[in-house]
Image (spheres, grey):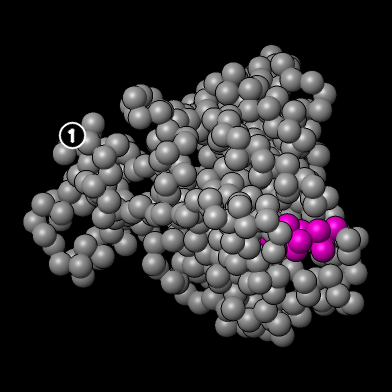
Amino acid sequence: MNSSRVDRLSSTPRIRFYGVQDLDKLPQLQKLSSADRKAMKAVAQVLPFRVNNYIIENLIDWDNIANDPIFRLTFPQAEMLAPENLDKVLWLLDNNASPEHMSEVVNSIRLSLNPHPAGQIEYNVPTLDGEPVAGIQHKYPETVLIFPSAGQTCHAYCTFCFRWPQFVGMDNMKFATRSSWRFQDYIRQHKEVTDVLITGGDPMVMKARHLSLYIEPLLEPGFEHIQTIRIGTKSVAYWPYRYTTDEDADDVLRLLEKVVIAGKHLAIMGHYDHWREIEPNVAKEAIGRIRSTGAQIRTQAPLMRRINDSPEVWQRMWQEQIRLGCIPYYIFIERDTGAKHYFEIPLVRAWEIFQEAIQKVSGLGRTVRGPVMSTLPGKVVIDGVAEIYGEKVFVLSFIQGRDPNWCKRPFFASYNPEATWLSGLTPAFGERHFFYENRLEEISLDKAHRSLESGEVRGAIALQALAPPDK
């Protein structure tokens, strides 16, 4: 071990996690009233809460808690639950309810929050030899998502997270794979798959030796059709020491290099929600070390009220990312799950923010696509607002679709200034259906039929698959 590595490891920050049990202990939270802290505890019974020392010490302005975007991004807020649900949980806390009673009420609330939006269970779980392949999703022909069992947690939990069911202890709502050979067999047999996305949770919570179990087999004979390996992670923002001074940071970088040397394209899908997450020097150093391996960093985030709902935030974030060699990739609409009501903004305002921000960055920043909704039929982008034959409309198209033929075919929805999701839109020009809906219904019926044949789903799930598609 060389002396520079010894010096780095001797000063390595150690991650410390804080959860609901620490809300009364953290000195920074003493500025809040006891009632505010109790409300935070109530929300944290329903939605996952975890933060770490790096975020607390480096990313939050504790002199401006009420308006701090990273505080809202990581700490539960009372308004994240509907008032009636907040009151239920507060009553249980005040009356020292039994764990069983608390769990019953909390799980009922969770199930009302659309825990798996866009058909993730009913539509996306594939089968192999007539049996579902646990821990992977295959929504689009060329891309498979892998959920390693050891990666189903994060360095901290985002309050908006659309995969929050992964972290609340309800195993029937969790995606995870423990049988490496099974997902490998599935990918080996599906030559149309060119991209593998390792996701979670956050795969970068895993030790390098565990992460390699999912990556290195894809570099071997039999997987020549895999051209790109992606790793979805928030670690670049929430724990950049993963790439600088963690005990196996160098091992992680060597693993990334191995992918590039093998001739695969490696993309780190870096999740950044605000420019403040790139400000610390260690965050910049982490980006530099990742890029030194030959990997690219593509950045993405949802657009959220109270966090980044201004063009200035996105402009500044994209410009800094470009300067550091990152590639802006997606700006998403907050998905219809969890605390969506707290973060959502009208689609027209989302488009206005995107349009104003992107016109102020150079061509290198215009790689970003958005605003994008990840819906049941696919990824729908808001291309703009127009007036056609005297009717004001949203101009929409698919970036990805369950049927690839849908991609980049423009379609139109009647203008609705209040709509926050695709389900709030109706076809323009008096049309009864969007162009893709008949085909989506065919896909739904086919999936339901095959699921019933294999015994993959029964009862309610089968009925849900037969229900009218999400508009």
The residue tagged 1 is 33
Residue depicted at 60% across the width and 40% down the height: 282
Residue 90 visible: yes
Crowd class of label 1 (few under 14; some 14 to 19; many from 20; radius 10 Å) = few
Query: Would you say residue 464 sits in the magenta stretch?
Result: no
439 horizontally vs 342: left or right:
right
**In this rendering, is residue 384 above or below 80?**
above
Residue depicted at 47% across the width and 35% down the height: 59
In this view, which residue lies farthest toward the front?
3
**Quadrant of image for the N terminus:** bottom right
Q: Which residues are magenta?
A: 251-260
In this view, which residue lies farthest toward the left?
95
**Residue 391 x %, y %:** 66, 18
Query: Element at badge 1?
Result: loop
Q: Quadrant of residue 300?
A: top right
**Residue 433 x %, y %:** 66, 42
**Quadrant of image for the C terminus:** top right
Q: Nearer the viewer, residue 130 or 172?
A: 172
Residue depicted at 73% across the width and 33% down the height: 324
Q: Main secondary structure of the magenta part?
A: helix
Q: Nearer the viewer, residue 206 or 409?
A: 206
Q: Nearer the viewer, residue 355 or 435?
A: 355
Q: Quadrant of residue 340?
A: top left
190 horizontally vs 434: left or right:
right
Amino acid at the residue labelled 1: Ser
**Residue 35 x %, y %:** 16, 38
Residue depicted at 40% across the width and 54% down the height: 17
Q: Nearer the viewer, residue 347 or 251?
A: 251
Residue 449 visible: no
